Amino acid sequence: MGQPPDRHLALLLLLLLWGQRSNPEVRRPSCDRCDRRLACNCSCGGWTCVPTVTDRALTLDLSFNYITAVTGDDLTGHGALGSLSLHGNKVSAIHPSAFDPLWSLEELDLSDNQLSVLDHRWFLRLGALRELNLLHNPYSRLGSGAVFRPLVRLRRLRFGSPALEELKRGDLSGVTELEELTVDANNLTRYEAGALAYVWPLDRVTLRLRGPFLGNTSLASAVLGDVSYPETQLVLEDLNVMRNRSAQPFRETASRRVRKITFRNFSVSDEAIVDLLMVMNGAPLTSLFIDGLTLSGEGRWERAKRTDHKSIDEFFMRNIVVLKVFHFASFLELSFLLHYPSKVSIINSQVFVMPCLTSRLLVNLQYLDLSDNLLTDLTMMETLCNGDGTLKGLRALNVSGNALKSLSTMSQQVAKLSKLTHLDISRNGYSSMPMGCTWPSTLRYLNISRAKLTSITPCLPVTLEVLDLSYNDLNRFTVPLPALRELHLSGNKLLRLPPGGRFPNLQTLTVQSNTLNTFGPADLRGYKRLQDLQAGQNKFVCSCDFVHFLRSALHGVGDVHLTDGAESYVCDSPLHLQGEPVGRVRLSVVACHRVLFVSVSCGAALLVGVLACVLLWRLHAFWYLKMMWAWLRAKRSSRRRRRRDGEESEQLLSYDAFVSYSERDAGWVENFLVPELEEPRDNDEGATTHRAPRPLTLCLHKRDFLPGHWIVDNIMSAMERSRRTVFVLSENFVLSDWCRYELDFSHFKLFDGSAGGEAAILVLLEPLSKEDVPKRFCKLRKLMSSNTYLEWPQREEGRAEFWRRLRCAVGGGEDDPLPRDPSVLLTLCR
């Protein structure tokens, strides 16, 4: 018996579910946002599980998604992966073998997730891992079994969160060569001494200590004691030191002779600062960095005067906020701290003046940074004591990002700083430059970038080796600077490169984001020592020369190297190449070798034209064209003449024959031909039954051509009014230009079939071969070769027959017209 249908359905559903479970790839989405460097950026994609990417990926960024779990098969096949980021997800579960395929992984970021427990099995196969970030997860302790023991190459470790409550000895067992350690211990309540001592020595330790941490003096002292070493830079974040004795935990730090301390997001009162100075009394502290300071109190520092801090060499303070600043008595009572440092930085702290009295205390100062404050030209004069050279040892001065406007005032104030080599006055309101300025002779580096300068004058010191004028409004730069090695002009309005002859020692030039259209070897020839050029992000016209030059430079050909990468060089024109990287442009031969192409094309066209002309000449095409033109012109003249004379459109024939002959044969025509054909003749004896031949009318050019008319018109008119055309052929005829012209017209009219008319009659006065006749008269040569012509007999007895046949050929009557074809005509007249 068969199974019930509902049971079949249940089995089918089970099979489908099993198939999906055994093959999770069926349901996993795919992310194809991978670049050519095999870096896959799948962040902010809304993924709820790990998507599939190419197994050749080297970097995978899955940050800021909604992934809740990492299964054992999610990362299978990704042995080449070097970096994996799951930052900012909701990961709460990771399969113990999820990371096993990642044998070459070097960076792993699991921060800002929901991991409540750390499992040492995650890291068993990650022997190549160098950086691990576990910050901001809700685990309260690091777990058991020495979580990080397999990570023998780990160099940077970050862990902890507000939920971290306990650190035990052995939690960091096996991690012995860390370079950087970051611990978020804001709410740490239990700490076993020596828990962080395993990772010594360290280059940098960052501790976040807000909350009750400093309230437990023994716990704070134990933590600071384990990470305080002379060569370790100690960074303390989120620190709040307000009450008395809150500085006591730092006594352990002082006893360990820590040299570098950094406070970030540091809230402190004046009393706590005094306590801190007293606790650190005699410690060899060389550098004190404070980034983000909120200071409260009234500025009472008397007790701190008895402390010794001669070892302090550098003060760095940024983002300082003084609460109730007008209640503070003075900072001058801290003058005992100002005699020693050589580097002082007070950045973005709303400082509008540093009194001259304070400046005079900085006797060892070499570096002063007052950037991003509220200094003006007037208060700057007070800070530098009206340029009297108070800060004699100052080598570097940075006052960028203030409200300075007069370049002349600045040059006068620093003129007596005899050791000043670096001056940064960028991001100020300089809009003009005077023609002359006074600078210290030692100045080598000058930064006036991001100002409002429109032109450059000789105000610039000739001693400069590095000059930064980026992001101004300059359209040219021609001031000679013989010692200059680096010139930065990005973000201006330059149309061409500065003339290289003015910078004989220049090695680095940056002209990005200008209005350059092109540049080439001719522009760079003046730079004798230029090595690095950055000229991308301009509006390039991709001509052939520019594309060829740039491609060579990008491949390292030549002395100058383009160090900003091929992707910075993009075509702006012509339109069909707009947006195309220059390195991928392929121009045609026509575009790149226009002169050569035009020359070859013109040469080929000329050769073809010559060959065509020769061919047309051989085929007598020019002769046909010339005859056609002359024929049409003559016909047009004839029509105008007929209209003028009022004649009918069909003109009557006036002559029996038009005689064409050479002037040298005129004697034969006048003495023999004309008398024989035009004069009346009696019948011969024995021929009384026949009618006497009528006299014929001949047209002779010497007698019948109209004077004052164009010769061609006369010839055409004579042929049109003649029934026949008689050619008296001889060597003289062939040599006569006008006779040949008449022969041309006759041939064009009669033998080429282009017009109507009667037959032509050929009379040979002397033996003449067909080779003497031009080859273009092919039909005439054919007639001569077939004996369709009359020969003038040299003997008297044959002349009567000659005249009879000629008269017969010429004088066919109107009632009995003769045919047009010469061969038929002469045959009938035999």
Image: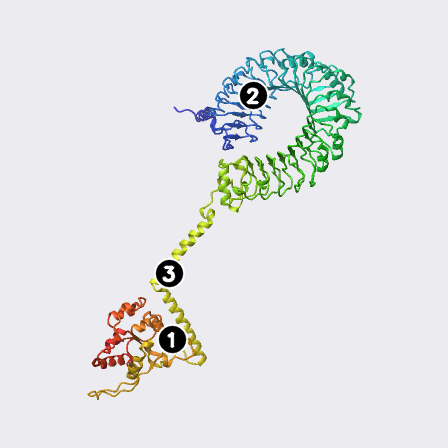
In terms of sequence position, does the residue under pointer 2 or pointer 1 come before the other? Answer: 2
Disc 3 and disc 2: Cα gap in Å? 86 Å
Please identify, in this view, whether the residue under mark 3 or under mark 2 is nearer the observer.
3
In terms of sequence position, does the residue under pointer 3 or pointer 1 come before the other? Answer: 3
Q: Residue 276's x, y, as percent? A: 72, 17
Q: Nearer the viewer, residue 289 or 207?
A: 289
Please identify, in this view, whether the residue under mark 3 or under mark 1 is nearer the observer.
3
Residue occupying the point 54% across, 23% down: 107
* Quarter-of-image position of residue 220: top right
Disc marking residue 613: 3
- Label 1 neighbourhood size at 10 Å, few (<14), some (14-19), many (20+)? many
In terms of sequence position, does the residue under pointer 3 or pointer 2 come before the other? Answer: 2
Is residue 641 toward the left or the right of residue 230 in the image?
left
Q: For mark 2, give the secondary structure.
A: strand
Disc marking residue 111: none
Disc 3 and disc 1: Cα gap in Å? 28 Å
Q: For mark 3, give the secondary structure.
A: helix
CB of mark 3 within 8 Å of CB of mark 1?
A: no
- Which amino acid is tagged 1? Met
User: Where is mark 1, residue-wise?
Assistant: 716
- Which amino acid is tagged 2? Leu
Disc 2 and disc 1: Cα gap in Å? 110 Å
Q: Nearer the viewer, residue 387 or 423?
A: 387
Q: Report whether residue 655 is seen.
A: yes
Q: Nearer the viewer, residue 542 or 105?
A: 542
- Which amino acid is tagged 3? Cys
Q: For mark 1, give the secondary structure.
A: helix
Quarter of the image containing the C terminus? Answer: bottom left
Q: Residue 472's x, y, as percent? A: 65, 39
